[in-house]
Image (cartoon, rainbow, N blue to C red):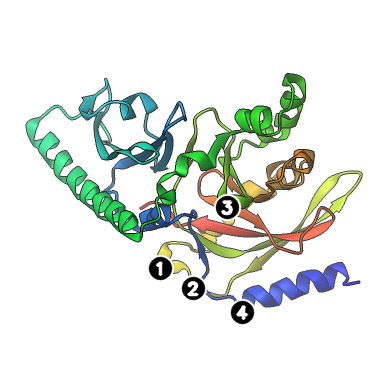
Amino acid sequence: MMSVSDFFSRYSQLYQKETIREIVPEGVFVRQLADLRTQGLDVGIFFKQKGIREPRQIYYTEPMPTAVAKKEGLLETTDRTYLSHTIIKKFKKLDYLRVVIAAPTRLDSRDERVAFLKNCQRIIDILLRKAKNVIHFGDFTPFLFAQRIRTLDWFLAKDLKLDEISAEAAAIPFNVAEPEYILLTGQNIIVVKDEPHVPSGIFYLVGGIGYSFDSSIGAVNEERMFRMTADLSPMGIDEAYIESNISQVTEDFQTNVHSLIFSDIWKKSPAKPVGVNIGNDILIKPTSDSEIWLGVFEVYLKKPIT
């Protein structure tokens, strides 16, 4: 049996040889959105599938209000100006695919609104072109992103069929850790918050965290960060950025990561966790040979917003 030190040493050598590796959400259309230029605006893309009451959202920077996505045109609140525009309407099983774009503030002057609409049109043109590409492929399923996103409450009550008391108990570690979402096998996503929306982005591998499990105190972060030798500075990912993000994970490793991946609820589910998104910018994935007693979690980061 491989010793703990040998296990960690093997990963240290693997990551030294690793070239740049990136992860984006699965699905042809969602993957095509990875290079969407948002012009510094907040963008939400809403998937409303027939038979699903509320639309699901992939967002850039900040989520858009669902109430705005149910309307069309130039809209205003007390503090922001929005443009809501339908890309696809009533196509096969899709009620609509709609984009909502938000200005940083409420735009009161004509010139501000014109400049905003011009930037919105550039984003809309790109989305229209990408949507046409997916239709050209002849595979409609990439648009049915809505069926892949479930809230934690829905997952526990409907998918696992837990009663109210069991569901509340099962939700405790997730509510304590407050991850953005859990990636599951089958390309499904569990959102811990009430709103079914998921932040989008490209994540780059920066290394791995080694851990072992002690039955008396739980998971012990071995304070090992297996570093990548690939240069990620062109993405804005430097040592300071890596350290500041890793500290969010290692401050309470048992609560933030380990207890979620190895929660007892997965024994009742055919789908298994393959990753945890923390604070939007961090994606943690267990390696294939990791288990509750010993392993390595790979750490992926988004490039910082500039």
Residue 72 drawn above or below residue 215: above
Q: Residue at x 77, y 74 (%)?
A: 9
Label 4 secondary element: helix
Do the residues bearing badges 4 and 1 touch, measured as CB atoms within 8 Å? no
Q: Nearer the viewer, mark 4 or mark 1?
A: 4
Q: Amino acid at mark 3?
A: Leu
Mark 4 or mark 2, whichever is nearer to me: 4
Residue, far left: 110
Assess whether mark 3 and mark 1 are in contact (beta carbons under 8 angstroms): no
Q: CA distance from mark 2 to mark 3?
A: 19 Å
What residue would you read off at disc 1?
Answer: 234
Q: Nearer the viewer, mark 2 or mark 3?
A: 3
Residue to which mark 4 is pinned: 17
Front-most of residues 72 and 198? 72
Mark 2 or mark 3: name the one nearer the start of the chain: 2
Question: Residue at the location (70% across, 30% down)?
Answer: 171
The earlier-in-sequence mark between 1 and 3 is 1
Which quarter of the figure has residue 267?
top right
Residue 231 shows which numbered tag?
2
User: Mark 1 and mark 3: span between their CA atoms?
Assistant: 20 Å
Query: At x 46% / y 54%, what residue is drawn?
Result: 27
